[in-house]
Amino acid sequence: MADKVELEEISASDFFYRNKSLAGFDNPVRATYTIVRELVENALDAAEMKGVPPKILISVEEESREGPLSEGLPWYKITVADNGIGLKPDDIPKAFGRVFVSSKYRLMQSRGTFGLGGTMALLYGQITTNKPFRITSAREGEPAYEITMMIDIKRNEPKILQKRILRGISRNSFTIVESHFEGNYGRARRKIVEYLHQTAIVVPYADILFIEPDGNVYFFPKSTEELPKRPKESLFHPKGVDLELLQRMVEITNTRNMKSFLTKHFQRVGEKTAREVLKLAGIPEDKKPSELTKEEILALFRALRSYKKFLPPDPSVLAPLGEKLFEEGIKKELLPEFVKAVQRPPSVYEANPFIVEVAIAYGGALKPTGEIQLYRYANKIPLLYDVSSDVSYHVIKKIDWTNYGLKSPEEEPVAFFVHIVSTKVPFKTVGKEFIANVPEVAREIELGLRICARELRIYLNRKRRKELMRKRYEIFKMYYQIIAEVLTELVGRRPPIEKLLTKVAGEAGINDEGGSEEESSGAG
């Protein structure tokens, strides 16, 4: 007799509870870093959504374990506060108490995508300490609400333990998240500080204050009030839909005929293009979408895939940092003597628009490390793990840097920066830590880096030429002094050696003290 098979249905919360590694919570060290990262990203998004320079406070405090759980790894309390748009009291439980509830399920660029990370950070804290988390939030001109809750993992539902209104009307909007978790801050510390440091580079318009468990304080001040433009929401590109999505669109549309269905639900599809696609699919223009058969939907899908005249996707859904802000952040945090950023034109992969921004920094406070110094970002999120698997790393290794005046990236005080913005970043894994080697993306990275490298070569050539001229000046100066002393003994008077040295120094771009004119004027 065959064994009876019992089927089980679990909620989204339960799935990620059982598979924590999929969301970056595979061990206490990685989990500690991921909790900080996810909550900080939510805070930055909230402030940028409001359209103000972010002010973010992060505090991690070590706590004593309680009762029978007194043995084991340390417990911590994390608090993240922001000056963002705030939440209505009815939205707080949904936003923080359910997996896969998000404001980001739209076709536009955003830091997060799945509505998973922030809630998983709180869920991980709950399952390791059995403590509730607290959310305090207010919208401008409304009362502030404080809600203490937990997540019902089996039902993927919030459990509100306490809800109270704080006195008074809030003059400003804000959100404060407080959670408890088991972790290993000592081993995660380096990654957390590096994450905040790299975040400060790509958001030079944000003030970030971080307080460690031992009381050490890191402050990353903003260097500009300028914010990048906000991305726009967009319609789907016809090349980017699959059969399932097309069927859903047909079911929910309120358009009266197929021509208006195509023009209103897809970007860059005009009436002429709609007619040609419908002709290719063999579907009448005036047919109602609700009357389409499964065979006609399949024919429409094939026509959308085979039609060759669609315009590229609309890049207005993307909000790159911009060359000026990128350079501003690099200068602020790394203090190089040279920096050049380049923003490439919009491009497309698999019907998804993307923009690559790259930069190269050299010298100054940068020092050789014996390895490639590569800073990678995706939609303003630093990527710290699996660097050698990233497409950017492979592109850098492929380029012959001796053509640009560098011995090798490992032996020079040089750093590379790659930022990819897209509605769908081509991550290789669910953990979202490195970008896949997509040919279109690799090409844009390489072209951008080569433009920056040419500027670096010009700078280095000038710098080395000035160093050579300086050495020649020092030799001339030494011999001119000797000649002047000899002539003084022979003719009884000293020749005008100072005027001659000033003339030579001017031709070499060196001041009278032997330094370059750039150094004497404070240029770097």
Image: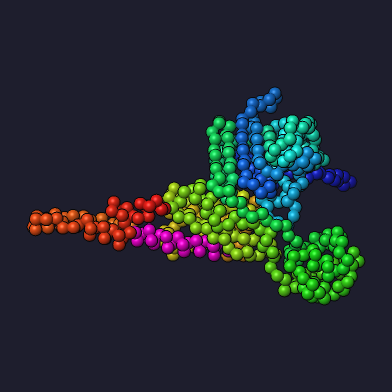
- Please name the predominant secondary structure of the magenta segment in the image: helix
Which is nearer the eye, 504 or 254?
A: 504
Judging depth in this view, the residue of 391 and 111 nearest the camera is: 111
Q: Over which residues does the magenta segment extend?
A: 444-466
- On the picture, is 493 further left or further right than 437? left
Instruction: Kindly tell me whether residue 218 is visible in this rendering.
Output: yes
Residue 194, quarter of picture: top right
Magenta-span inclusion, residue 214: no
Seen at 73% across and 60% down, the residue is: 234
Q: Position of residue 225 (x, y in %)?
A: 58, 48
- 142, above or below 469, in the image: above
Query: Which residue sits at x=74%, y=44%?
Result: 16
Q: Position of residue 102 (x, y in %)?
A: 75, 48
Query: Which of the two residues, 388 or 206, is positioned nearer the viewer here?
Result: 206
Colour scheme of the picture: rainbow
Q: Quadrant of residue 136?
A: top right
Most extreme residue toward the top is 67
Q: Judge by depth and name the residue closer to the eye, 415 or 235.
A: 235
Q: Residue at x 41, y 53 (%)?
A: 523
Residue 411: x and y in percent read: 43, 54
Q: Is residue 410 left or right of residue 447?
A: left
Residue 413 seen in the figure: no
Q: Residue at x 69, y 39 (%)?
A: 172
Give percent across and percent down for residue 173.
70, 40
Q: Is residue 446 magenta?
A: yes
User: How many marks do you count on the picture?
Assistant: 0
